[in-house]
Image (cartoon, grey):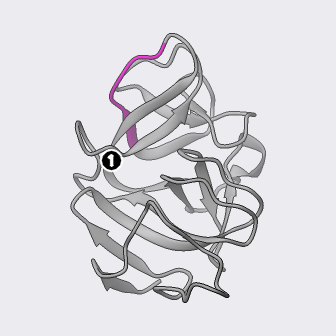
Amino acid sequence: MSQVGSFGVNPKKVWDGTSIPLPARVGSIGSAPEGDYMFVQADGAVAQYAFVKISDDGQADELTTTNAGSNNLQVGVAQIAAADNEYLWVWIGGPGGGGVGTGIRGKAAASYAADANLNTTATDGVADDASTTRIQNVVGLTTLVGAGTVELKSTGHLKVN
């Protein structure tokens, strides 16, 4: 992973790699006021606000308890939907990343309690506070009654350990 600074980070845009030149190499990390982002390639369709696992080769796949594994798996959150093989910047947190009013959001299951740990679920890309595999360094800032999205705040880069 290489740090590329703030240039080229646009979490609201996808690239096809053919008609639109890529702004960075896959695996590059860029910074923005709301935290750090990693440039990845979608490994299957990725929904907006889905939590994703990021493999060593920069492929992003919607995160589940089944594919979470361990060993410091890098995790991100897509702020835009992407089709299979499209490229995008995913939010990976960082110290002081996200927070109230930043617009950084993630999908959460029903009955999520504000400021609780976020964990993987069996549902692609959705986190919850009632599971066993913790997504480290991130919490949601609002309580949900039904499933939806929560604003996120991080204390470091997101990972499953």
Q: Residue at x 73, y 72 (%)?
A: 85
Q: Quadrant of residue 94?
A: bottom left
Q: Secondary structure at mark 1?
A: strand
Query: Which amino acid type corresponds to the residue marked 1 in the rendered image?
Result: Ser
107 lies above or below 74: above
Q: Residue at x 48, y 52 (%)?
A: 79
Q: Position of residue 71 (x, y in %)?
A: 61, 62
Q: Position of residue 56 (x, y in %)?
A: 64, 76
Q: Which residue is mark 1?
A: 154
Q: Dot 1, how many residues are within 10 Å of its Cα: few (below 14), some (14-19), or many (20+)? A: many
38 part of magenta stretch: no
In-image side of 132 versus 98 (left or right): right
57 lies above or below 128: below
Residue placed furthest toward the front: 19
Magenta highlight range: 138-144
139 part of magenta stretch: yes
Q: Position of residue 102 (x, y in %)?
A: 26, 45
Q: Residue at x 62, y 27 (%)?
A: 131
